[in-house]
């Protein structure tokens, strides 16, 4: 699970989650790609260059190695429905959006381990146990066994989620004149091609992937 944007400062804030029943399938494909191209630095949407674009596309393609891989994204447009206004603080807003996302991706009887990007919070904001407890409470059972936050540089899985989530948010920003890089446009278009979406501006759903737009009415406690 990874996020892009600031929930308290940017117009668009998105959280994405890549669900992998067997993460090793995709991670082995990424490792083979890295070794083949001798590229071992962090992959990040904001770092795309002309020289990196093709490699980044192939990085995204690794999701296709596992037909059971599923991507889910929750995006908030603060110009309309601001989650900070709804939940009180930026930390509560982030936690509630993450809770809603995890609840939405969970199938009956599944157990989840969540690896999340190391989102900076004050010392008294305990994101990991809060997310675990809130999801388990909503599901009325043990659903999330653990939540671990990692530096994205240590995890190819988190770097893949960064590309997917940032690419989705980029389409929204570009459509409103808030972004204009042709390289990021190319990468954003490729991500939507892989997901099977012509556009995500009105949301998107398929048998494997889902892009949902936050509004106050979409929140279910």
Image: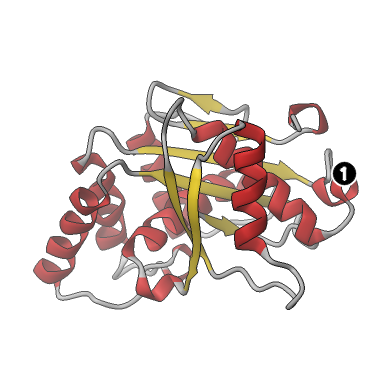
Q: Nearer the viewer, residue 92 or 192?
A: 92
Residue 81: percent from the left, percent from the top?
83, 39
Rendered-image quadrant of the C terminus:
top right
Where is residue 30, by image quadrant? bottom left
Residue to which mark 1 is pinned: 86
- At x 62% / y 59%, what residue is drawn? 129
In this rendering, the answer to whether 80 lies above or below 2 is above
Q: Nearer the viewer, residue 182 or 33?
A: 33
Where is residue 200, by image quadrant? top right
Q: Evaluate whether residue 200 shows in this view.
A: no
Where is residue 217, by image quadrant? top right
- At x 85% / y 48%, what residue is drawn? 87
Kind of element beneath mark 1: helix
Residue 120 lies left or right of residue 39; in this view the side is: right
Residue 4 lies left or right of residue 149; in this view the side is: right
Q: Evaluate whether residue 52 shows in this view.
A: yes
- At x 30% / y 68%, what residue is drawn? 52
Residue 190: percent from the left, percent from the top?
36, 44
């Amino acid at each position: 699970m990874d996020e892009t944007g600031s929930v308290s400062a940017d117009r668009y804030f998105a959280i994405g989650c890549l669900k992998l029943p067997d993460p090793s399938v995709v991670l082995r494909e990424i490792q083979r790609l890295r070794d083949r191209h001798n590229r071992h630095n962090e992959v990040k949407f904001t770092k795309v260059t002309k020289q990196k674009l093709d490699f980044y596309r192939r990085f995204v393609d690794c999701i296709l190695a596992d037909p059971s891989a599923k991507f889910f994204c929750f995006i908030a447009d603060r110009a309309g429905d601001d989650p900070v206004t709804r939940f009180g603080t930026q930390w509560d807003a982030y936690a509630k959006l993450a809770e809603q996302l995890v609840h939405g991706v969970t199938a009956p009887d599944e157990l989840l381990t969540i690896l999340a990007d190391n989102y900076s919070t004050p010392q008294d904001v305990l994101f990991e146990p809060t997310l675990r407890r809130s999801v388990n409470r909503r599901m009325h059972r043990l659903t999330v066994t653990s939540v671990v936050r990692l530096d994205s540089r240590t995890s190819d899985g988190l770097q893949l989620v960064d590309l997917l989530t940032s690419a989705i948010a980029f389409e929204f920003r570009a459509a409103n004149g808030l972004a204009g890089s042709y390289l990021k446009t190319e990468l954003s278009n490729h991500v939507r091609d892989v997901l099977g979406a012509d556009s995500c501006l009105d949301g998107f759903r398929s048998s494997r992937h889902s892009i949902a737009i936050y509004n106050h009415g979409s929140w279910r406690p």
